[in-house]
Image (cartoon, helix red, strand yellow):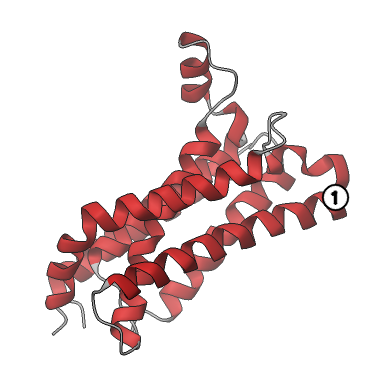
Amino acid sequence: MAQPSFKKIHLALLVIVLLVLIWSGISPKSYLTWSLEVGPATLGIIVLAAAYRKFQFTTLVYIILSVLCIWMFIGGHYTYERVPLFNWIKDHFHLKRNEYDRVGHFLKGFAAIAVREVLIRKSCLKPSKWLIFLVLCVVLALSASYEIAEWLAAEILGREAHDFLGTQGDIWDSEWDMALAFLGGVLSLLTLSRLHQYYLRLFS
């Protein structure tokens, strides 16, 4: 169970995420795109809140998931290819595309820490090469599932799903997204596993 001090941090993170969600829903570029972008994250928040008493993640995981939710909410408000800061970066550095979507998929790879925690706490697995392999497999599976969801949206909605897809004319966009999520997963495991173990010991 989370210590009282951590519960306050978790509550603060939830409040921040919900405030950003509310902001993102105020006059977004497209309410259809907004609902498609924020829907998965909002569902995730509901599931995490409902399961909080039975299964509490470490504070590190909640921080990572909060960042991911906020990233998705901002993208939902402006659409991923129109986020102002990244438009400025695109123009200033003469890039071919707004890279907000690419950075977002890279950050989604950091959900590997959440996957790692579930496998350690709910299975017989311990920190090992096999754990790393399985975590990265799940990260790739989740990324592929998201790309399949985008494809289904395109099949159902047609041109109306253009902003949701955010390909910006790149025929290899889905492959880039999955590769970046994988790289994000690798980097998160390399840099955060030791810190994650520290948080896990607080549950023991």
Looking at the figure, which quarter contains the C terminus? bottom left
Locate residue 95, reporting x and y percent: 53, 16
In depth, the one of 81 and 144 nearer the eye is 144
* Crowdedness near tag 1: few (<14), some (14–19) or many (≥20) residues, C-alpha within 10 Å: few
**Residue at the (86%, 55%) spot, across then down:** 156
The answer to whether residue 132 is above or below residue 22 is below
The answer to whether residue 169 is above or below residue 14 is above
The answer to whether residue 51 is above or below residue 107 is below
**Residue at the (22%, 52%) spot, across then down:** 191
Locate residue 94, reporting x and y percent: 52, 10
The answer to whether residue 108 is above or below residue 115 is above
**Residue at the (24%, 65%) spot, across then down:** 59
**Residue at the (31%, 54%) spot, across then down:** 188
How many numbered marks have been drawn onto this rendered protein structure? 1
In depth, the one of 64 and 138 nearer the eye is 138
- Amino acid type, residue under disc 1 in the picture: Leu
Residue 167 in view, yes or no: yes
Locate residue 80, reporting x and y percent: 59, 35
Give the labeled residue for mark 1. Answer: 157
Looking at the figure, which quarter contains the N terminus? bottom left
Q: Secondary structure at mark 1?
A: helix
In which quadrant of the rendered view does residue 50 lie? bottom left
Locate residue 57, reporting x and y percent: 30, 73
Residue 54 in view, yes or no: no
Judge left or right: residue 16 versus residue 90.
left
Residue farthest along the front direction in this orientation: 129
